[in-house]
């Protein structure tokens, strides 16, 4: 049974940064009601409204993985580990974005899959064999014809974007070699619930996975979860290592049962846990609004740091507008001089001059707090402060 536990209100598409703010409409599919649900059979948590992929991932997708040093470092470490442990003859990445990970792999034995043509162009230009296509069964057949099978398939922050999970795994099974490994990494549901980071939910994050749910779903496809790594990216993620079950020499790491036990202990198998999370989310919203209102009454200047998709959920759920946040700053070229989705808050190019008058930065990219604080030592030294809503709305300087 699928039951709703959270209503995050009417939301715009999270990465829809407009050149000019305009009134969006539900009828035209520019706005939708963001509800989050729990499936008591599979333990999968998902949003209820599925937006057509072509509306989300097309030739203007602005997000670039290479914009963050944290992500680049994480990808470099993983690439070294994959090469050492699995020695793939052929490596394929689903959702290769601007090539932040595959740049660590040899052009000759790497295949990219990226449906956003603006991004696919980047890896093609660098010489990587790139399919500018959505990950589906037809594409897996095409890949099978050309390459026969793939030894390591990797997808980071991508499978959560694809509504038809069953087709995802069916397509993986179609081309994964007998001893092949599927590696997926996505924000961890346990971390999301613990931190009340309700902003992990938006139209592109159709699912936020737990190890429990991943294990249940892949089981249907004769796949087994044989290892798990906890990683710090995106506010706390899990990296899942998956193989075909028929390969009976698989050693299952203790980390798998440890993680699943933790999730069950926290109640990720029970609807009541998510109802509580819903209550905490309302509380978080009220506290953030009153904190921001209090600072505005003192005539403080508040600017958003990191025009993230997550910030879109927060702004639109909490009703935070241009009267509270003067503007956002971001380093991503395709977001600059545009407006936060659903709001009249402009996005400006990151530069140090911007700091002059800012009293508080609202952390849109709270998941990069470490990297940002390192960069903004001077701002903090001069008395500048940050506001975060994770795990609770508060002012922070470290
Ligand atoms: P991310 O947290 O991955 O966002 P999303 O919620 O959209 O998945 O994106 C980080 C955003 O923050 C990205 O637009 C780049 C921006 N950013 C900066 O502008 N400066 C920085 O120092 C960092 C780390 C990120």
Image: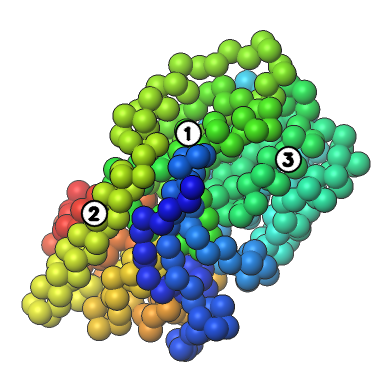
Q: Are marks 3 and 1 in contact (CB under 8 Å)?
A: no
Instruction: Give the Cα distance between marks 3 and 1.
Output: 19 Å
Instruction: Give the Cα distance between marks 1 and 2.
Output: 23 Å
From where the camera sits, is residue 81 visible?
Answer: no
Compare residues 13 and 72 and report the one nearer the observer. 13
Q: Is residue 264 above or below residue 280?
A: above
From where the camera sits, is residue 192 visible?
Answer: yes
Residue behind mark 3: 170
Q: At x 76% / y 58%, what residue is drawn?
A: 132
Instruction: Give the Cα distance between marks 3 and 2.
Output: 37 Å
Q: At x 31% / y 43%, what residue is drawn?
A: 273
- Horizontal side of 206 relative to 104 (left or right) equals left
Compare residues 113 and 398 and report the one nearer the observer. 113
Residue behind mark 2: 280
Disc 2, SS: helix
Q: Position of residue 287 (x, y in %)?
A: 17, 63
Q: At x 20% / y 59%, what residue is drawn?
A: 283
The numbered dot on residue 211 is: 1
- Residue 146 found in image quarter: top right
Which residue is outermost to the top?
Answer: 249
Disc 3, SS: helix
């Amino acid at each position: 049974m699928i039951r709703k536990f959270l209503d995050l209100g009417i939301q715009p598409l999270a990465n829809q940064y407009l050149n000019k703010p305009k009134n969006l409409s539900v009828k035209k599919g520019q706005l939708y009601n963001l509800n989050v649900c729990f499936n008591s059979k599979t333990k999968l948590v998902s949003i209820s409204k599925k937006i057509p992929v072509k509306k989300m991932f097309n030739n203007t997708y602005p997000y670039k993985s290479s914009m963050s040093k944290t992500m680049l470092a994480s990808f470099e470490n993983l690439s070294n580990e994959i090469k050492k442990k699995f020695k793939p003859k052929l490596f394929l990445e689903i959702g290769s974005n601007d090539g932040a990970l595959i740049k660590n792999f040899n052009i000759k034995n790497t295949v990219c899959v990226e449906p956003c043509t603006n991004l696919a162009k980047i890896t093609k230009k660098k010489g990587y064999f790139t399919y500018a296509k959505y990950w589906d069964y037809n594409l897996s057949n095409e890949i099978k014809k050309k390459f026969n099978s793939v030894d390591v398939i990797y997808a980071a922050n991508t499978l959560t974007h694809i509504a038809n999970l069953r087709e995802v795994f069916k397509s993986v099974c179609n081309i994964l070699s007998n001893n092949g490994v599927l590696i997926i990494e996505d924000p961890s549901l346990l971390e999301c619930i613990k931190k009340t980071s309700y902003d992990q939910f938006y139209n592109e994050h159709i699912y936020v996975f737990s190890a429990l749910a991943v294990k249940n779903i892949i089981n249907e496809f004769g796949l087994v979860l044989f290892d798990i790594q906890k990683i710090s990216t995106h506010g706390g993620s899990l990296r899942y290592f998956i193989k075909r079950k028929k390969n009976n020499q698989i050693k299952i790491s203790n980390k798998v049962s440890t993680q699943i036990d933790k999730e069950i202990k926290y109640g990720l198998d029970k609807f009541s846990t998510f109802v509580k999370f819903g209550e905490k989310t309302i509380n978080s919203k009220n506290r953030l609004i009153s904190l921001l209102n209090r600072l505005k009454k003192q005539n403080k200047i508040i600017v958003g740091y990191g025009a993230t998709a997550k910030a879109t959920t927060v702004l639109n759920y909490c009703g935070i507008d241009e009267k509270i946040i003067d503007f956002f700053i971001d380093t991503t070229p395709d977001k600059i001089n545009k407006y936060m989705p659903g709001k009249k808050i402009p996005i400006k190019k990151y530069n140090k001059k911007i700091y002059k008058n800012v009293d508080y930065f609202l952390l849109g990219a709270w998941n990069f707090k470490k990297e940002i604080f390192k960069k903004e030592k001077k701002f903090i030294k001069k008395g500048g402060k940050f506001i975060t809503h994770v795990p609770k709305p508060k002012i922070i300087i470290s």
